[in-house]
Image (cartoon, rainbow, N blue to C red):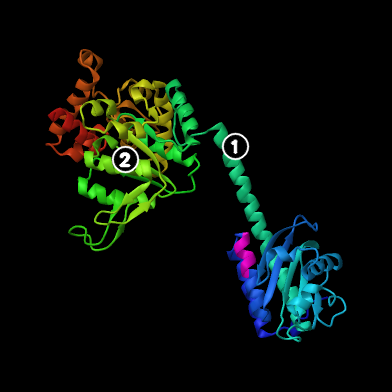
């Protein structure tokens, strides 16, 4: 039956406009079908209805959205709706009944009698002569609720809806292909967020791959700047909780009471400044992964509370009596020897074993020399566009300086040095004189010193150069202020 525009009402035109907007704005198929159903029922003042989609132009139906009809009944072979679907599919034309109770085509169906269906209309969803489904609506109140105008509108509406459905299906198909491609790429490059091809890093990747697919707690060891948080994020991103939150908290910078409030939340009035209830980070991470950076610095009392979370999955906000349940996977990191901390009585032994089901030790940069050129090239490409686009590579002499340096600040220091070199270079390459580390240490001056002595020497020198200003000294060394504070604390001890 051809469309008759003259027969359409203002409500019909409004509905056609609405569905044309949905074509360009809604790409989730389930959401789109719900919107199509609601618009059609509103335009026709229908009381019930459904949309059913076929698989690749066949009569094998796979998707259904219904209003005031049990979806299971729609496909029941004895139901009136099944006959409508089949007839619409076979004729490829719309069906209209002013009074199904009196219509000889449908009056024998028990469901028509039981539901006292009066007016009904059904039209095929077609796209370029391809049948993709059916739209059906009915009414039990008014035997003349639907007429020829209604059918003309519904056919025009179905043409627009079919286009929107096809767009959504194509979008979902592309998303699926992307997920499959990403999964296949992850098999080839399982942790492409982390740069490294050295034997040491391959061993780390192998262990990460094993723990990522589980929910066990993992303790990550490594010097400052080795990328402990990056490893934690990669484990989460490739694990069963990847679609849930990853929440991290650095444990060394906050006072005990403030850290407790950050982790567990607080109740209004629990302490001065607690003007409202606050959800803690552990609640925010519910269902996901919680990363505790520098776990060795957490107080003994907080260690006890943390142990209860790991063992029982329970938390209690500061100042509250209500116990809340959380489901969190814990990943932790430290640059200290936790076993030594346990022996000194500074860290709970039971918590240590809870956190250390699996341990991953990240090698310092000086022990993975083969990765230094890769990392340097990565940081050059990462920052050159915004910093100095004319620089395209390193000179061989600059690469030698980079590889020979001992990198006390590890990967983070290397990143800072490359950024600084890009700023300093006025040529197409980076040369030794552009590197902040150039001539910082001569081999004959340091051959009798161990690594700790060398590091301490340069920390003191940087502080002296900048009048004790820790921020400037950290920038000079290419490390974080946090790392410098730890080093100074060790010097004081």
The residue singled out by tag 1 in the image is 184
Q: Residue at x 36, y 21 (%)?
A: 367
User: Which quarter of the rendering shows the N terminus?
Assistant: bottom right
Q: Residue furthest right?
A: 104
- 174 horizontally vs 205: left or right: right
With respect to residue 147, does 342 lie above or below?
A: above
Q: Which label number is shown at residue 307? A: 2
Tell me which secondary structure the magenta stretch mostly adopts.
Answer: helix
Q: Residue 217: where, in percent of width, then height?
A: 40, 36
Say if residue 415 shows up in the picture. Answer: no
The earlier-in-sequence mark between 1 and 2 is 1
Q: Which label number is shown at residue 421? A: none
Q: Marks 1 and 2, how far apart in space?
A: 38 Å
When asked about the image quadrant of residue 448, the answer is: top left
- 413 horizontally vs 92: left or right: left
Say if residue 259 shows up in the picture. Answer: yes
Q: Residue 279: where, in percent of width, then height?
A: 33, 56
Give the magenta-colored segment's residue range.
Answer: 29-35
């Amino acid at each position: 039956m051809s469309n008759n525009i003259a027969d359409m009402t203002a409500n019909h035109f409004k509905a056609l406009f609405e569905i044309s907007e949905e074509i360009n704005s809604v790409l989730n198929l389930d959401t789109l079908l719900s919107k199509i159903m609601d618009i059609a029922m509103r335009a026709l003042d229908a009381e019930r209805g459904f949309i059913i989609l076929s698989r690749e132009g066949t009569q094998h139906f796979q998707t259904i959205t219904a209003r005031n009809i049990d979806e299971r009944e729609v496909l029941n072979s004895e139901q009136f709706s099944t006959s409508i679907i089949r007839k619409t599919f076979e004729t490829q034309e719309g069906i209209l009944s002013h009074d199904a109770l009196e219509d000889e085509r449908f009056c024998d169906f028990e469901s028509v009698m039981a539901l006292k269906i009066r007016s009904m209309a059904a039209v095929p969803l077609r796209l370029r002569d391809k049948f993709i489904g059916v739209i059906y609506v009915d009414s039990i109140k008014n035997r003349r609720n639907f007429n020829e105008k209604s059918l003309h509108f519904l056919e025009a509406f179905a043409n627009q809806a079919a286009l929107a459905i096809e767009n959504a299906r194509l979008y979902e198909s592309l998303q699926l292909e992307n997920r499959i491609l990403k999964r296949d790429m992850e098999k080839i490059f399982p942790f492409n967020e982390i740069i490294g091809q050295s034997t040491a890093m391959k061993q780390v990747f192998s262990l990460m791959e094993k723990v990522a697919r589980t929910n066990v707690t993992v303790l990550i060891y490594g010097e400052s700047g080795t990328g402990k948080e990056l490893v934690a994020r990669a484990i989460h991103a490739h694990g069963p909780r990847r679609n849930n939150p990853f929440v991290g908290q650095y444990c060394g910078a906050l006072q005990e009471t403030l850290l407790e409030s950050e982790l567990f939340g607080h109740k209004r009035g629990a302490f001065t400044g607690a003007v409202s209830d606050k959800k803690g980070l552990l609640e925010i991470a519910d269902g996901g992964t919680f990363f505790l950076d520098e776990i060795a610095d957490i107080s003994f009392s907080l260690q006890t509370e943390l142990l209860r979370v790991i063992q029982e999955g329970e938390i209690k906000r500061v100042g509250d009596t209500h116990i809340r349940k959380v489901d969190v996977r814990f990943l932790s990191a430290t640059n200290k020897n936790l076993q030594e901390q346990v022996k000194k009585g500074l860290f709970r032994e039971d918590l240590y074993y809870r956190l250390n089901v699996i341990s991953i030790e990240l090698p310092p940069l000086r022990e993975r020399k083969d990765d230094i050129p890769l990392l340097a090239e990565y940081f050059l490409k990462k920052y050159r566009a915004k910093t100095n686009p004319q620089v395209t590579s390193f000179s061989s002499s600059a690469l030698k300086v980079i590889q020979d340096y001992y990198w006390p600040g590890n990967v983070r220091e290397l990143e800072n040095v490359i950024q600084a070199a890009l700023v300093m270079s006025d040529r197409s390459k980076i040369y030794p004189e552009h590197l902040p580390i150039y001539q910082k240490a001569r081999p004959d001056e340091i051959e009798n010193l161990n690594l700790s002595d060398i590091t301490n020497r340069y920390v003191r020198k940087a502080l002296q150069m900048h009048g004790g200003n820790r921020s400037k000294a950290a920038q000079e060394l290419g490390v974080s202020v946090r790392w410098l504070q730890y080093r100074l604390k060790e010097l004081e001890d």
